[in-house]
Image (cartoon, rainbow, N blue to C red):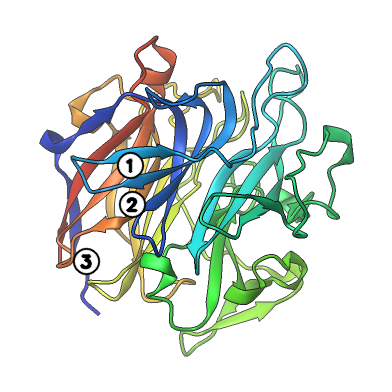
Amino acid sequence: MKRIKGLRRLEETVIRIESCGDNWHMTWADSDCQYVSLCDGSGFPGMPHKDFNSRAYAIHGDPPGIRFEYLPGYPDLVNDWTTRECSRYYNFGILAIDGALYQFLSTPNHPFPEPTQPRFVGAKLICSPDNGKTWRNQDGSTPVTWEPWETRGRENMCFFDEPGEAFSLITVLQMGRNYGDNQDGYVYLYAPNGNTEGTMNQLALCRTPRARILHCGQYEFFAGRRNDGGAEWSRRIEDRCVVHTFPPGWVNRNVHPYAWHPSVVYYRPSGLYLMANWGMGTDHTEGWFTKPSYLGFWTAPAPWGPWSQVHEEQAWTPAGDANARAYQPQIAPKWIGPDGKSFWLVWTDFQTIDGGRPYYAFNLQKVEVEI
């Protein structure tokens, strides 16, 4: 293993791509393209535009010459803000493995516009057996069903109403092209341990054999780190232990709780795991983006840690823009330099989403790594 000593964002490398949407969780497929999840937006110029609640695209090439591909077979999930047909499912964690795509879509407890404070309380799992051409429900049936609010439960969700509302915002550990850097046969999922200050800044972890991703009832939860550095696992979510705790003071309450949803990759050049994570810039109002966000990076020798911080910014302002309200940093799994001395980070800036068209929601920047 090669220790990562520090990171530096290269401000002169910022690229802003005209787009509308956010979050951008990515995975690297056997075809050499990356697949990316989009939430709440109309996508990219020159493609079919709707007010998508969630959508998936393919990304071809490397920065700066990247190209986005619309996937016509992805099941339409469109917001209608005049009805309850809005803010239903948000596609965060995504994984490409052996020609299939798996995508976890977080669901709140009710539509965002309703007056009672919403929270994310579960996650639905859908699958494409053919790299995004067609899509199925978790049980293999088609077409994909977007369940009405009142029918959602553990029988049709991968996670739902779990203890502490844990595992409602899923991140999938990325391990190279076609998950090819994985050695133990398991897929690992991270999530905040809850929806409040004190739980949302705790990181939880579970795993499943790569052949059993669709069998959520058989997932194993991290239940503690052994003295030899290994991990204990349990089928009981109640036995879960915290993998890492992030700094306090960066979880909002108003709008809906939203912070500490990480991006984690196996950083092959160093033999370590690298995590990017962010905290909501909030203040006494407990609202969204009342100040710049927190940005941090951590490394670990195993998916369950221990995690050591290698970079911290308490005011994350890409390109030196003091008005930036950046969030959801994503380490693009394909865009890691072969020598490990750089990678590309993707993020969204709430300022550009909320400030009128044109939107530049898909932002990327090169990060220099000291090894």
Quarter of the image with the C terminus in it? bottom left
Residue 115: image location, x then y, percent: 75, 17
Instruction: Name the kind of residue labelled 1 in the image.
Output: Val
Instruction: Determine the CA span between mark 3 and mark 2.
Output: 18 Å
Q: Amino acid at mark 3?
A: Ile
Where residue 27 is drawn, which disc sits there? none
Question: Quick one: label 3, few (<14), some, or many (20+) residues within 10 Å?
Answer: many
Looking at the picture, how far across and down is residue 75, in whole percent?
A: 64, 39
Residue 267, horizontal then vertical, whole percent: 30, 67
Residue on which disc 1 sits? 346
Asked if residue 284 is positioned above or below residue 68 in the image, the reply reads: above
Q: Which residue is mark 2?
A: 332
Q: Nearer the viewer, mark 1 or mark 3?
A: 1
Of residue 202 and residue 179, the one placed in the foreground of this image is 179
Q: What residue do we see at 43% from left, 69% from top? A: 179
Q: Quadrant of the N terminus?
A: bottom left
Q: Are marks 2 and 1 in contact (CB under 8 Å)?
A: yes
Between discs 1 and 3, the one toward the N terminus: 3
Residue holding disc 3 = 4
Q: Hey, which residue is sitting farthest right in the picture?
A: 151
Q: Is residue 182 left or right of residue 205?
A: left
Mark 2 or 1, nearer chain start: 2
Report, in whole angstroms, how far the alpha carbon at label 2 lies from the one at label 1. 7 Å
Q: Is residue 339 visible?
A: yes
Badge 1 density bin: few <14, some 14–19, many ≥20, Cα 10 Å: many
- Residue 225, by quadrant, is bottom right
Residue 209 in sight in this render: no
Is label 1 in a helix, a strand or a loop?
A: strand
Rendered residue at 29%/76% (across/down): 271
